[in-house]
Amino acid sequence: MSPDIRKHRGAHPEDRQLFANAQLPILRVAVRDLSWLLSHDYTITGALKLVGDRYSLTERQRLAVSRAACSDQSKERRSATSVPAEDLGGEDLIVDGFNIIITVEAALSGGVLLDCRDGCIRDLSGVHGSYRSVNETDQAIHSIGTALDDLKPASIAWVLDRPISNSGRLATRIRDLATQLGRNWNVEVVFNPDAEIIGSQRVVISSDSHVLDRIKRWFNFNRYLIEKQLAELWLIELS
């Protein structure tokens, strides 16, 4: 297995073909069908195979459909627990570090972004046990910091996955940038960040579906940042 030497978290070489305008109608139908199956208690594995086989989707298209879809129950719950930006002043926030940084890195480097059924904007990247910073990492952290400042929270806690390699280096990078920018961020590297986030009483900054279905309050940060700061990006509407 060759080492990851990418300098950007941009588009896969086949993405322009897989997510061309001509492909979007069938992908939207696939998201609709998968969401219906999930709403009727099908497992994601079985439902995604049914839908992917029916529409002859590639593995990468199936990944996009699975990230864009959600059950009616999840959609309603996420909508009910979402906190508007104007209500975040003075609140304590907790940031799902890898989840947010990777999406912003992808946005800045021209990767495909998905406008999903629950209103979140997600990317197609994944760390798979190992994270490598890219040319856009510092810019991504700066952009996130600017957007967080605009919300005027009382405090900000970041959590990163200790089992993912280079998580400690990224934590140091975030702390150093926070010091340079005069921001009082608490950055922790933990073994089970999902449990840390779900158990927190803070407002959650994440687009992780597993997390969003288990928390009391969250903020749709990716959409907020992208709408505020990024005019030029590759966003496909699959909602």
Image (cartoon, helix red, strand yellow):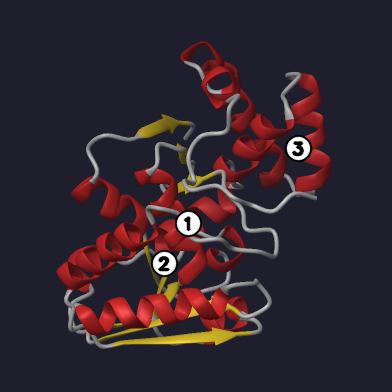
Of the numbered discs in the image, which one, if any, rests on residue 102? Answer: 1
Res 48 label: 3
Residue that label 2 marks: 81
Indicate left or right for 115 with 89 as reference. right
Q: Nearer the viewer, mark 3 or mark 1?
A: 1
Crowd class of label 3 (few under 14; some 14 to 19; many from 20; radius 10 Å): many
Taking depth in this image into account, of 178 and 6 the one nearest to the observer is: 6
In the rendered structure, which amino acid carries the disc numbered 2?
Thr
Q: Relative to 48, is 214 on the left or the right?
A: left
The Cα atoms of the two marked residues, 1 and 2, are separated by: 24 Å
Which SS class for mark 2? Answer: helix
Callout 1, which amino acid?
Answer: Ile
Residue at horizontal 51 percent and vertical 77 percent from the top: 169
Q: CA distance from mark 3 to mark 2?
A: 26 Å
Earlier in the chain: of badge 1 and badge 2, it is 2
The residue drawn where x is 81% and y is 46% is: 45
Q: Residues within 10 Å of mark 2 (few under 14, many from 20)?
A: some
The residue tagged with tag 1: helix, strand or loop? helix
Q: Regarding mark 3 in the picture, which secondary structure is present there?
A: helix
Determine if residue 124 is in view.
Answer: yes
Sequence-first tag of 3 and 2: 3
